[in-house]
Image: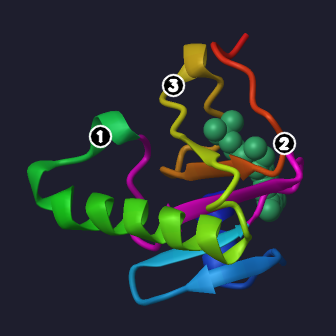
Amino acid sequence: MNLFEKIIAREIAADIVYEDEYSLAFRDINPAAPVHCLVIPKRCIERIAHARDDDRDLLGHLMMVAARVAKQEGLEAGGYRLVVNNGEDAGQSVFHLHIHVLGGRKLGWPPG
Ligand code: DGP
């Protein structure tokens, strides 16, 4: 079981902000912004590059959940950023697909 599967199974505690049949969202343990949540699928896809054609609905669902979480966290008016890190150069450290939802401060671009 990977780390995020343990969070789904409640073997590791997390501050969960949203859950449904297909997805879970919880606060990042090491926040990079005042609001920093992660949206994950309950069925593990290691990284976006491993997604298959039949993951299309699930991927769309995760984006909708990310927008919902951002709204719930009060980020809609000021704006927010969604990030998916894929692989080593992007700094992916947990190999279970996740969308970072970041906001609550002015975010710089491009990322360093
Ligand atoms: P990435 O670098 O894109 O793979 O992001 C992984 C994120 O997961 C990173 O921002 C920190 C977060 N994280 C790692 N371990 C835990 C944990 O045990 N609990 C929570 N809530 N977040 C974690």
Q: Which mark is residue 50?
A: 1
- Where does the N terminus fall, quadrant-wise? bottom right
Q: Residues within 10 Å of mark 2 (few under 14, many from 20)?
A: some
Q: Position of residue 91 (x, y in %)?
A: 65, 24
The mark lying in front, picked from 3 and 2, is 2
Residue 44 drawn in magenta: yes
Q: Which mark is residue 105?
A: 2
Secondary element type, mark 1: helix
Sequence order check, earlier mark of 2 and 1:
1
Secondary element type, mark 3: loop
Image-based side of 93 in relation to 60, left or right:
right
The type of residue carrying mark 1 is His
Q: Please state the extent of the stretch shown in magenta in the rendering.
A: 27-47
Residue 28 found in image quarter: bottom right
Q: Residues within 10 Å of mark 3 (few under 14, many from 20)?
A: some
Instruction: Please give the name of the residue rendered at 39% of the width and 67% of the height, measured from the top-left corner.
Output: 64
* Labels 1 & 3 near each other (Cβ < 8 A): no
